[in-house]
């Protein structure tokens, strides 16, 4: 039987949410039925790439999209696809760039062209050039894609408007994180006077890192022995480090950068903080809940991601109000209940099977 050839476009292949997702999926693809190529829209090779290649995926790097090439990026994609043709499926996971990726695929006659978005907002939307590009991108996407996917209603509605789309639950490797016997029995491990907080998020404006640091500084005023472990990297990392030092909290804020052992680190902490301005879903939040952590999240997180272990706090509240809400919860001795059935819906194997069923349908 001839294998279906699938091209999957990704912004990077590092340790962040969507990249981790497809790195994990590479372990579960059916390589007897499909041939996978990851087109990575970043020029450098990433440390995780060897793992993906060893699992059976071919990787190809493209130039990153910039303000200089953004309106003609489809030509770069077209040439890259042409060198590797033919493909049966092109699956784009690059949000606003999806339209150009799939336009190139449409010109080449690729029968199955999948747009898959993963966020529900954009911190650049106030910029005139980006607003213009986003407007035309959404128009082009309707004509160039013939399958529309999103991880949540919020994400799909933001990108697709009234265009019908299908929900497909993003997945995590539950085997690494899930510990059902302890998910609701962490009270004895919690140190109410020295709680250990953790977050997993890129240091970019959309993840609200400055506000998170403000919240933690307020927490330290009430519980001075608290710690915050911060996993992730990004352009704001030096700024966060500098501000933490200016406020004298650098010994309590541990910036670890990107890590492979997120599952082990999660299980060594008490609470998860996630004040993102918006999220497509929030894979790290799923991992935190699977690890048994009670989570303090913003109202910018899709409701879909709450598997019972989340306390939602409005971003309209101040950092001190966030801190008070969190401390009141800790002092109450509450322990939120996990919805195991809902959590199991986010098993990465389920997502992989759904995607391969879609790939095989053309």
Image (cartoon, helix red, strand yellow):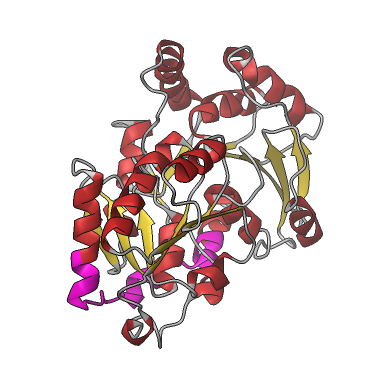
221 lies left or right of 30: left
Residue 349 covered by magenta stretch: yes
* Residue span colored magenta: 328-353
Q: Main secondary structure of the magenta part?
A: helix
Residue 86 to residue 33: above or below: above
Residue 37 picture location, percent across and down: 73, 45
Residue 287 picture location, percent across and down: 46, 65
Task: Identify the residue at image location x=25%, y=55%.
Answer: 323
Residue 197 to residue 143: above or below: below
User: Can you see residue 195?
Assistant: yes
Residue 106 picture location, percent across and down: 60, 26
Location of residue 127 (image quadrant):
top left
Task: Identify the residue at image location x=37%, y=47%.
Answer: 212
User: Can you see residue 93?
Assistant: no
Residue 55 covered by magenta stretch: no
Residue 205 picture location, percent across and down: 43, 35
Of residues 169 and 14, which is closer to you in this image? Answer: 14
Of residues 236 and 311, which is closer to you in this image? Answer: 236
């Amino acid at each position: 039987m001839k294998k279906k050839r699938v091209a999957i476009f990704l912004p990077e292949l590092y340790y962040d949410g969507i990249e981790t997702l497809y790195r994990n999926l590479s372990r579960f693809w059916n390589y007897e039925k499909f041939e996978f190529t990851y087109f990575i829209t970043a020029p450098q090779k990433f440390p995780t790439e060897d793992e993906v290649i060893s699992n059976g995926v071919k990787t190809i790097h493209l130039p990153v999209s910039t303000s200089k090439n953004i309106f003609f990026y489809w030509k770069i994609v077209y040439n890259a696809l042409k060198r590797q043709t033919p493909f049966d499926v092109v699956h784009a996971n690059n949000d606003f760039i999806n339209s150009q990726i799939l336009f190139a695929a449409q010109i080449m006659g690729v029968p199955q062209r999948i747009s898959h978005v993963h966020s529900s907002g954009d911190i650049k939307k106030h910029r005139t050039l980006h607003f213009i590009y986003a407007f035309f991108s959404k128009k082009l996407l309707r004509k160039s894609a013939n399958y529309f996917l999103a991880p949540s209603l919020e994400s799909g509605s933001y990108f697709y408007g009234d265009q019908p789309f299908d929900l497909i639950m993003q997945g995590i490797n539950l085997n690494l994180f899930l510990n059902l016997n302890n998910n609701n029995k962490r009270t004895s491990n919690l140190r109410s006077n020295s709680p250990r907080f953790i977050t997993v998020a890129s240091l970019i404006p959309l993840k609200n890192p400055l506000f998170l640091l403000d919240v933690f500084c307020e927490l330290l005023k009430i519980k001075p022995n608290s710690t915050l472990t911060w996993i992730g990297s990004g352009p704001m990392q030096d700024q966060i480090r500098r501000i933490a030092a200016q406020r004298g909290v650098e010994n309590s804020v541990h910036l670890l950068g990107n890590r492979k052992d997120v599952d082990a680190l999660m299980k060594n902490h008490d609470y998860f903080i996630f004040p993102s301005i918006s999220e497509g879903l929030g894979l790290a939040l799923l991992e935190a809940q699977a690890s048994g952590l009670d989570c303090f999240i913003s109202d910018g997180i899709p409701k879909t991601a709450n598997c019972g272990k989340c306390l939602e706090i409005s971003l309209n509240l101040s950092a001190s109000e966030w801190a008070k809400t969190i401390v009141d919860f800790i002092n109450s001795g509450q322990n939120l209940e996990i919805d195991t059935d809902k959590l199991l819906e986010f098993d990465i194997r389920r997502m992989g099977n759904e995607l391969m069923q879609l790939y095989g349908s053309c």
